[in-house]
Image (spheres, grey):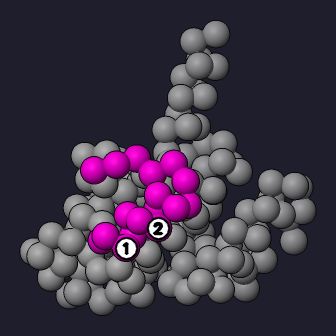
Amino acid sequence: MSNTILATEDLTGLTAATVLGGEPVLHALPRSVLEWIALVRHGISASAVDAAVRVMGIGQTELARALDIPERTLARRKKEGVLSRDESGKLVRLARVVERAVEVFEDERAALDWLKSPNASLGGTSPLSLLDTDLGSVAVVNTLGRIEHGVFA
C-alpha cells in the first residue's frame, strides 16, 4: 500500500509551480489560469530559471533555446532578479507543458525524457525544441492528448 501512495505523491509532485521553484521562488502557488496571469504580469523571480534547469535536468543553454530567450539575457535577469512579462510567460508556458506531460505519462522521468527526445509525430524534433513558440507548444500539447487517448501517430 505504501508504494501506491508514494507513486501517487510522485505523480502529483511535479506541477508547473514546482518546476519553477514552488512557493519559495514564486511567493505563491497559482491554482488557476487567472492566478498564473497575475504572476506573469508581475514578473517571475529569475530564480525560477535555476529551478527549471535543476528539475528538468537540462543546461541553461538548452533552456534558453527552448524559451527563445538569449542566454546572456537570462544571465542579466538573474542579476536583476526578475524576468520580464514576456520571459515570465515563456517560462510558465514551458512549466505548464512539463506538468501536462507528467499527467499523461504518470511518471516524472518518463515525461522529462519524452520532452527531450525526438518525436516522429512532431517531425522528428523534440517536444522541448518546439516550446519556443505558441504554435509549437500547442502541437506538443495536442500530441500529449493523442498519447493520453492511445493515438500515437
Q: Is residue 96 visible?
A: yes
- The quarter holding residue 122 reads bottom right
Q: Which residue is mark 2?
A: 37
Residue 41's disc is: 1
Q: Residue furthest top?
A: 1
Q: Which numbered tag is attached to residue 25? A: none
Residue 129 in the image: state x and y as whole percent.
Answer: 54, 80
Q: Which quarter of the image is occupied by the N terminus?
A: top right
In magenta, the rendered stretch is 27-43
- The residue under the point 30% across, 89% down is 70
The residue under the point 62% across, 77% down is 137
With respect to residue 115, does 17 lie above or below?
above
Determine whether label 1 and label 2 are within 8 Å by CB.
yes
Query: Is disc 2 placed on a helix, strand or loop?
Result: helix
Under mark 1, the amino acid is: Arg
Q: Viewed as shown, does residue 105 lie left or right of 10? A: right
**Image location (x, y in percent) of residue 32:** 55, 54
Viewer-side residue, 80 vs 146: 80
Q: Residue at x 46, y 61 (%)?
A: 36
**Outermost residue to the left:** 79
Q: Is residue 30 magenta?
A: yes
Q: Position of residue 81 (x, y in %)?
A: 15, 70
